[in-house]
Image (cartoon, rainbow, N blue to C red):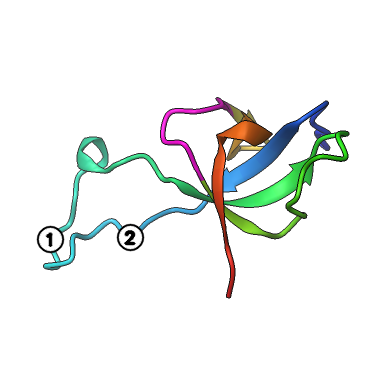
Amino acid sequence: MKVKPLGERLLIKPIKEEPKSAGGIVLPENAKEKPQRAEVIEIGTSDDISVKVGDIVIFAKYSGNEIKIDDEDYILIDWNDVLAKIEK
């Protein structure tokens, strides 16, 4: 299924963090923080968005709407909820 966000929205796929702490302790699911890094999958129809598909972004922790497409987790967020773009 293909989803195209409208307006100033982005479809992003959260990047799963390591399930271990820095000391090597395996963390249970409820002790993990929500991911804040994601890959941009689709971009809305606005010309004001300055990221492209494939970019890695940092977004506000509790922003957007979580959706499931073809058994994969995605988040649909407003462009204003993107805090930074990670450059390599």
x and y percentages locating residue 21 in the rendered image: 18, 60
Of the image marks 1 and 2, the number of the one nearer the N terminus: 2
Is 63 covered by the magenta stretch? yes
Q: Callout 2: 10 Å neighbours few (<14), some, many (20+)?
A: few
Helix, strand or loop under label 1: loop
Helix, strand or loop under label 2: loop
Query: What residue sits 77% from the left and 55% below the top?
Result: 52
Which of the numbered marks, if any, corresponds to residue 25? Answer: 1
Q: Is residue 60 left or right of residue 51?
A: left
Q: Quadrant of residue 54?
A: bottom right
- Per the image, the residue denoted by label 2 is 18
Mark 1 vs 2: CB contact within 8 A: no
* Extent of the magenta region: 59-66
Label the magenta part by its dominant secondary structure. loop
Type of residue at label 1?
Ile
Type of residue at label 2?
Glu
Q: Is residue 56 left or right of residue 11?
A: left
Image quadrant holding the N terminus, namely top right
Task: Relative to 74, say whether 50 is above or below.
Answer: below
Is 43 covered by the magenta stretch? no
